[in-house]
């Protein structure tokens, strides 16, 4: 028999414990829900912080690379133009020339070819220029370089048209243009981008560039390559370039466009002529020097179609429209949550080739698809090259 005191203890205790069971379960559920919510918030914060760090790192790398290239270009041009390969700019007589001071006539060769654009088969600094490498003819697709010999800096050529501006302010905002003229055809004016600076413009009376360069050429900045591909893209689409010899005249002039004001074009500071030999078939898919370095590394018609449809649906430019897609990475890159390891999205790199009435272009993109638990979403562009690039339409993948 159970003692009376023990019986009463059991009788009183059991109902109390039973009455507490629902509230204990509820608290457990609430704790689990709160835990999941905190984990989700933490994951979102980590993902946001990671994205911000990646963006800051990318921007810093871009600024660092741009600054390094600009400094290297300026140092090389200063030393080259004055006959010295050291870091200190000096004149032909060996005296130091202050920064931002005009080079003047740098050599007998400069004097001989002043106000001319000369073409050459090799890339040379100004103190290494060899007249034996000058040429008046090249085969389209082969490396071809040019040097501009001016008798004054670009800002001085613009100054008479901008009497209210100081030279240093003109130098800050100006660039150069190149006027192409194929024999018997209208002129085509195009603009250099991405290589001039205020100090360059205040100093340089001679500078170099290229139409097509050898991969190992010392010149690194794009001093003419993009501009020539634009000329080639437009001229071939118009049917201006014919098989055989094409006489080409080029003229260099300073120019400046300020916001809400028309472009100011200065006098021609240098002129040159060269014969371009064109062999049909040289402009074709896969020619990196005339069509660009992009190429497909795999074929997936379904994925290419999906990316193309997205590009067409989200496209902004009206002068050219997406026409083909090339997959430029071998496989998807999988992204996972930094804490849980769960797949969040996947990304693949591709190039969209576009066609217009007057030219064709290409641009690189990153196409990403969000993981939705059991499958991936349709996908969007999550990154892209800063600019698109011109190419002849014969370069487009079929």
Image (tube, rainbow, N blue to C red):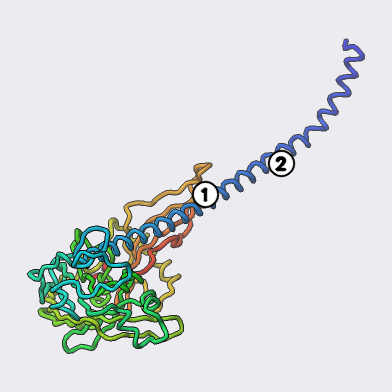
Residue beneath the point at 91% across and 15% down? 5
Relative to residue 275, is residue 310 depicted above or below? Answer: above
Q: Residue furthest top?
A: 1
Residue 65 vs residue 298, the one in the foreground: 65
Answer with the quarter of the image where residue 96 lies: bottom left
Image quarter where the C terminus lies is: bottom left
Q: Position of 329 compared to 245: left or right?
A: right
Task: Point out the image quarter for the N terminus.
Answer: top right
Measured Cα–Cα span from mark 2 to mark 1: 24 Å
Residue 189: image location, x then y, percent: 28, 83
Q: Secondary structure at mark 1?
A: loop
On the image, numbered disc 1 is attached to which residue? 373
Please tell me whether mark 2 sits on a helix, a strand or a loop.
helix
Left or right: where 135 falls relative to 325: left
Tell me where residue 214 appears, x and y as whole percent: 18, 62
Q: Residue furthest left?
A: 132
Label 2: how many Cα within 10 Å (few below 14, some 14–19, many 20+): few
> Which residue was labeled with disc 2?
30
User: If you read the primary sequence from the N terminus, does the residue marked by circle 2 or circle 1 appear first?
Assistant: 2
- Looking at the picture, does residue 62 appear above or below residue 151? above
């Amino acid at each position: 028999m159970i003692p009376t005191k023990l019986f009463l203890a059991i009788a009183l205790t059991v109902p109390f414990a039973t009455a507490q069971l629902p509230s204990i379960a509820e608290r457990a559920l609430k704790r689990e829900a709160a835990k999941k919510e905190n984990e989700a918030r933490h994951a979102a914060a980590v993902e946001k912080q990671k994205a911000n760090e990646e963006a800051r790192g990318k921007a810093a790398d871009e600024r660092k690379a741009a600054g390094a290239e600009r400094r290297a270009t300026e140092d090389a041009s200063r030393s080259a133009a004055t006959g010295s390969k050291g870091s200190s700019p000096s004149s032909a007589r060996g005296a130091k020339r202050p920064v931002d001071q005009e080079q003047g006539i740098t050599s007998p060769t400069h004097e001989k070819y002043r106000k001319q654009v000369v073409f050459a088969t090799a890339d040379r600094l100004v103190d290494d220029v060899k007249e034996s490498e000058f040429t008046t003819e090249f085969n389209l697709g082969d490396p071809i370089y040019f040097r501009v010999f001016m008798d004054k800096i670009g800002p001085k050529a613009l100054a008479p048209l901008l009497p209210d501006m100081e030279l240093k302010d003109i130098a800050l905002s100006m660039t150069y243009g190149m006027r192409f003229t194929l024999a018997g055809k209208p002129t085509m004016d195009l603009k250099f981008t991405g290589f001039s600076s205020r100090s360059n413009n205040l100093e340089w009376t001679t500078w170099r560039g290229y139409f097509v360069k050898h991969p190992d050429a010392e010149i690194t900045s794009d001093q003419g390559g993009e501009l020539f591909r634009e000329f080639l893209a437009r001229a071939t689409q118009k049917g201006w370039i014919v098989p055989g010899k094409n006489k080409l005249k080029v003229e260099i002039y300073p120019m400046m466009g300020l916001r809400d004001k028309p472009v100011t074009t200065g006098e021609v500071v240098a002129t040159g002529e060269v014969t371009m030999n064109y062999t049909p078939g040289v402009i074709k898919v896969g020619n990196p020097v005339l069509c660009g370095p992009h190429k497909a590394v795999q074929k997936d018609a379904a994925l290419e179609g999906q990316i193309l449809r997205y590009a067409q649906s989200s496209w902004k430019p009206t002068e050219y429209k997406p026409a083909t897609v090339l997959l430029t990475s071998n496989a998807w890159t999988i992204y996972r949550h930094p804490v849980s390891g769960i797949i969040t999205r996947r990304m693949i790199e591709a190039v969209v080739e576009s066609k217009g009435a007057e030219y064709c272009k290409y641009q690189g993109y990153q196409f990403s698809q969000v993981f939705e638990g059991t499958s991936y979403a349709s996908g969007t562009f999550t990154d892209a090259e800063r600019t698109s690039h011109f190419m002849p339409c014969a370069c487009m993948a079929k």
